[in-house]
Amino acid sequence: MTQDGQARSPGTVTALRRPPVRESIVVRSGRRRTFETFVRIIGVGVEAEKAVPELVAARIVAALAAGETVVFPDDASAGAGSVYLSDPLKLEQLLTG
């Protein structure tokens, strides 16, 4: 059987599409290994300048004071956030190449 439930002839290989970033993924590994792997690979291939903590804090406070419930506190997250809110699949493609 394939992803769409249709039988194929023997010897036919159908590549499975990996889950989108927005879906949850079951991790079958210990916490320590999962955390170490996450820390090691997070941000790989994503070029983004870190904002200073004072700027991040100021933007969060200003957004909350304005009644906003979704806050992107730096330029990198604001750019990614605007794409995500309008087209999540486009953001996934941008981040995964």
Image (spheres, grey):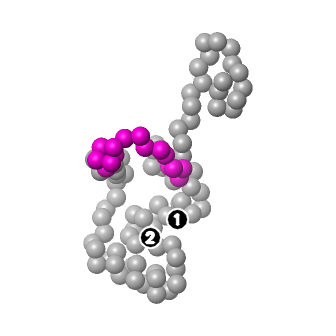
Determine the secondary structure under disc 2: loop
Asked if the stretch drawn in magenta spans residue 83, the answer is no
Say whether residue 20 is visible. yes
The spot of residue 56 in percent (x, y) is 34, 75
The spot of residue 67 in percent (x, y) is 52, 84
* 3D distance between C-alphas at marks 1 and 2: 9 Å
> What residue did someone put label 1 on?
82
The spot of residue 70 in percent (x, y) is 51, 72
In terms of sequence position, does the residue under pointer 1 or pointer 2 come before the other?
A: 2
Q: Residue at 54% across / 46% down in the picture?
A: 20
Determine the secondary structure under disc 1: helix
The spot of residue 97 in percent (x, y) is 46, 43
Near mark 1 (Cα within 10 A), the count class, few <14, some 14-19 or many ≥20, is: few
Q: Amino acid at mark 2?
A: Phe
Position of 45 compared to 82: left or right?
left
Near mark 2 (Cα within 10 A), the count class, few <14, some 14-19 or many ≥20, is: some
Say whether residue 90 is visible. no
> What residue did someone put label 2 on?
72
Query: Where, quadrant-wise, is the N terminus in this rendering?
Result: top right
Cβ–Cβ under 8 Å for marks 1 and 2: yes
Q: Residue at 60% across / 24% down in the picture?
A: 14
Q: Quadrant of residue 9?
A: top right
Q: Residue at 27% across / 72% down in the picture?
A: 52
Q: Amino acid at mark 1?
A: Ser
Residue range in magenta is 21-35
Q: Is residue 89 above or below residue 5?
A: below
User: Nearer the viewer's eye, disc 1 or disc 2?
Assistant: 2
Q: Nearer the viewer, residue 23 or 42?
A: 23
Main SS, magenta region, reads: loop
